[in-house]
Each structure stands twice: as structure tokens, then as C-alpha cells.
Amino acid sequence: MKNSKLTGNKCPVISLFRQIAVSRRESGNYYAAANYESFISKLILFLGKKQELFSLHEITKEWVERYIQWLHAKHPEKPQTVDFYFRGLRALYNNAVEKEGLQETSIMNPFYGLRIKKPTVSKRALSPEMLGRLLNPVLRMHLSDSRARTLDVLLFSLYCRGMVFYDIYNLTWNMIARDWQVQYRRSKTGQCICLSIPREGQEIMLRYRQSGNPYVFPFLRETAKGRFLSERSALRRINRHLDVIGRLLDIPCKLTTYVMRHTWATLMLEAGKPVEIISQCMGHTSIKTTQIYLSSISTAKVDSEVNDMLNRFVRPEKYRKSIGI
């Protein structure tokens, strides 16, 4: 069923989507704006010469299915990439429908029932033993200056509740109070986060403080030749260095800033902290999002908890005394 109001909307969809991306950038949500621009560029490739006239009402379920097939052909064996662009188009579409005042109309949702099947991937989190390798002070002796700085960025994320790279990149000294409290909005969700920077994080910050430079980690924005480095380019450089460090330490998964975020969340869970607390610390808008980050609880932890239950409710008192409980 097509709604007459939606069918009458002839505004070129690319123009409409670009307005949404610009509004995100103007509101300071640079992360979302950059993603939206990527989604638009991919859509332009698909539309080709039709891009100038293609309008919102032409996005039907059949059209979306063709777009998904095209994405699969462009990115074979990369369902995560296909899902990234599929969800991006859906987000832009929903924003455009709302912007045009069509959200209350009775329209057929072209994305209803469509999903990208993704293979099950192992959760990415370091064990305490692997984390200990990164925390070993001897490691720095084997790293170049640039890789030592990269290690500091990774550990700062750990000490600051798994802070994402984009927020570390944009962290300034005027956001830090005298008592080392910091308040900022997550670049991705806009959620307000308040935290007290622990002593280890403070030491890392002070290591890179430059008089007259507002940024906590100024080296993230500079190349070896002193040229400006964007967030994305800086993240790629950091992750390249982390990959080298990970291989040096025989860490089985590819080491990235995201692995540290997963690690922080998983260690909190292993320590018995409520998922609600973990979710708030990470700046998530939904506990379901937090659960994506959490690795399965270790076998040792599960065994310990099960034994505790058996000792308390199942095993007879005589047996408990015989094993010293």
C-alpha cells in the first residue's frame, strides 16, 4: 500500500539525505555525520545516473532487496559490511520520513522483515592473563616512541571505562575539572557520561600535556611531518600499531581499541557488576547493546558460582564440613 502523501514527495533522495548529514555535523555529532556521508556515497554508486531524480517514494521493499543483492555482490563474504550499509540506509530513510513529516502516515515500511544474516563471531575480549602482558612495564622497553604512545591510548581507554577512540581523540583539558572529573557526550549516542579519571589515567594524560594545546592527546592529530590527521586516519594508525603490539605479545585476536572496550565490559561482568551499571558507564542507550559487548563468562567463574550454589542449597552439611566449607 502506497500513501498518497509519500508518493507525491519528489524531493531527490540524495539531496534529502545530505541535508540530514549536514544537520548532524552542525549539531556536533561528527561520528554520525561521517557515517551518513559514507552511506550516501554508497547509495550514489548504486543509483548511478538515476541519483539526481530518485525520490523517497521509490524506496520500496523490492528496491531495498535489489540494493541488498548489489551490496552482497560488491562485498562478497563480508555480511558485516553489507549490514553496515543496509542499516545506514534504513537510518537515513527513517530520518527523512520524520523530516518530511511523514512519520504519522500509514505507509508500508520498505525495511520491514528484511535482515542481513551475519555469521556468529566470537566475542572480542582479552583474558586477565593477556591483559597482564599489556600492563607489564617491560613492554615499553621494546616499543618505539609512536607505539608506546599507542599503548598509552589503549590503556587510557581501559582505565576510563572503555572510552571509545573518537572521544579520546576529541578530549580537551577544559573538559577536565580540578578533581579529575570529566563530563562529555558520547560521539555516537549523544549520551552524557561523567566519570572520575583514576590515578593511572591521570599519569598517562600528564605525560602528553602541552602548554597552549587544548587537546589531552595532541599527537593523535599530527603526522610525523606535522600535518593534521583526521579521526579516521588517526584510528587507522593506532590500530596498525596495536596489531604489531598484539603479535609481539602473542595475543590470539587482532588487537584494536574496540577489543579493549569489550575487555573492560567483560571484566566488569566477571567481577559480578550489574549489566545496568556497565551499560551506563559505556554510554549505551539500551542494555541489549551492552550485551553485544559482553563475552561469555569464563568457565572457571561459572564453575565457581555453580559450586557455591550446590554448597549452599544442595550438599548436606556433613559433606560441606568434610571439605572445609
Image: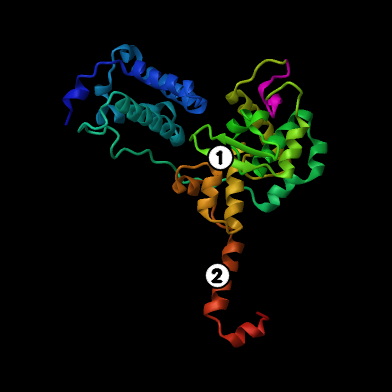
Magenta: main secondary structure equals loop
Labels in figure, total? 2
Is 157 placed above or below 42 here? below
Residue 248, image x, y percentages: 73, 39
Q: What element carries label 2?
A: helix
Compared across the picture, whether 149 is left or right of 257 comes to right
- Quick one: 247 or 154, which is closer to the camera? 154
Quadrant in which the N terminus appears: top left
Residue found 66% across the figure and 30% down from its top: 238
**Residue 217 within the magenta-colored segment of the rendering:** yes
Residue found 55% across the figure and 43% down from its top: 282
Is residue 256 among the parts visible in the rendering? no
Crowding around mark 2 (Cα neighbors within 10 Å: few <14, some 14 to 19, many 20+) is few
Tell me which amino acid carries mark 2. Val
Q: Give the range drawn in magenta.
A: 215-225
Crowding around mark 1 (Cα neighbors within 10 Å: few <14, some 14 to 19, many 20+) is some
Residue 122, image x, y percentages: 53, 47
Which residue bears the numbered disc 2?
A: 306
Pick whichever of labels 2 and 1 is earlier in the sequence: 1
**Which of the 4 image quadrants contains residue 97?**
top left
Is residue 315 among the parts visible in the rendering? yes
Circle on res. 193: 1
- Quick one: 205 or 250, which is closer to the camera? 205
Tell me which amino acid carries mark 1. Ile
Q: How far apart are marks 2 and 1 (CA)?
A: 35 Å
Q: Is mark 1 on a helix, strand or loop?
A: strand
Residue 123, image x, y percentages: 54, 47
Quadrant in which the C terminus appears: bottom right
**Residue 5 within the magenta-colored segment of the rendering:** no
